[in-house]
Image (spheres, coloured by chain):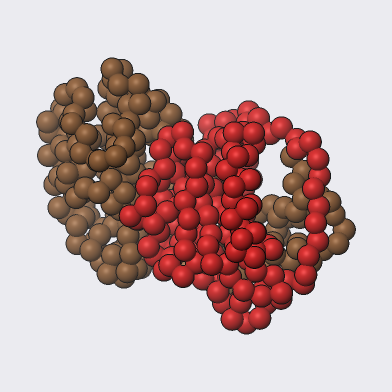
Chain colours: A brown, B red
Amino acid sequence: MRPPRFLWVPFELGRPFGAPGEPAFQTKVVRSVLALLDRQDGPVILEDFPEDAPAVSEEDMTGWACPINLPKPAAAEEPAMLEEVLCEIAQLAPWYAFALEGRGRSTFGVAGLEIEAVARFLHAFFDGIPDNPVPGVTLGDALRLANDDIRSWYLEAATARPGAASSRILADWFWGETAAGRLLLALRPVCAKSPDAGVRLVAETQFVPRSQRHRHA
Amino acid sequence: MVRLNDLPDTDARHLRTKECPPFDSEPWVTGPPLAERRVAIVTSAGLHRRDDRSFDMRDTGYRVIDGTLSADALVMTHSSSNFDRTGFQQDVNVVFPIDRLREMAAAGEIGSVARFHYSVMGAGWLPHEIEPTAAELAGLLKEDAVNAVLLSPV
């Protein structure tokens, strides 16, 4: 596209300044891109940032484990799925609290609901079109925000303990091992047939990451 | 941007099919040295204050982020589920390096940090679809005497 000044970085999608908790490395990236402003040899300066982010390699991940013992998946009956998710939430709640305390912040809460209410709202789509509990947004967007929230809550809880985990391992854990992941995987084809066009759009395009759609509930 | 060969095949295929029309022109301006620049961040990460409106699925608008706001007050309602959010969950500066800019301003590496920063939700817009928003933001940035913008794509 040939923009005036551009620094290409090799970091994964969602991390344009490298890695969390690495301020020196982030500064190096910011310095590199802002340095392009002092260059006079444009238009069109395309530079590559030469270093990979100081990410944890997946070979070093043997120390990370889910903070709770997740039960084996039960038969994927819809009512049981909600109970499994609520049970999981109860087990993970202390870890979420540790994460909140340690970071002083949380990205959970964009739907404005408690985590248990998020789970119940999502599960209610198995029974048709639920009431929209999120004021000011469409039902499709409420579904999307609830989906964001349950993933944020789980992943913040999962990263509460010291020790890093790669984003790929964390995603595989959520989608491959948790009841919440199974709930979302099972819900996607149901919502894809919803009479609500916004719900269908979310289910078809945003509900489950492309890299996780091979999984089955 | 990531290396395509570091992505799962499904994501790499998706990105390879993205339409990337070339710009019609190659605009170019120079300015004062970096140590005299006033720097703002514009990100496509779908960030906003927790009490601000969330981004909806077809939202071409923007949200204002007060430069004095604690970065920890920000949430993300980007519509895509196909990028990592665990980095942002642990450290806002991974997508919105406001603390790094403040440090650089304090050290005299940049002139100052803008009063206001901006976020859009960058899910698949073509340039002409987001252009009116970009033009409006350019005006707002000029009013704030900004002469350097750090674009943070997500």
Give the x, y percent position of residue A41.
87, 58
The residue closer to the viewer here, A202 or A71, is: A202
Give the mark count.
0
Q: Is residue A174 left or right of residue A116?
A: right
Give the x, y percent position of residue A112.
25, 49
Give the x, y percent position of residue A111.
28, 45
Q: Is residue B66 visible?
A: yes
Give the x, y percent position of residue A110.
31, 49
Residue at the far front in the pictured view: B143
Q: Is residue A161 left or right of residue B65?
A: left
Picture residue at 79% right of the left edge, 48% below the top:
B27
- A178 in relation to A54, above or below: above
The residue closer to the viewer here, A123 or B119, is: B119
Q: Is residue A192 visible?
A: no
Picture residue at 59% right of the left edge, 33% below the top:
B129
Q: Residue A193's image quarter?
A: top left
Q: Is residue A108 left or right of residue B75?
A: left
The residue closer to the viewer here, A145 or B94, is: A145
Residue at the far bottom in the pictured view: B107
Picture residue at 69% right of the left edge, 70% below the top:
B37
Picture residue at 73% right of the left edge, 71% below the top:
B34
Q: Is residue A159 left or right of residue B47?
A: left
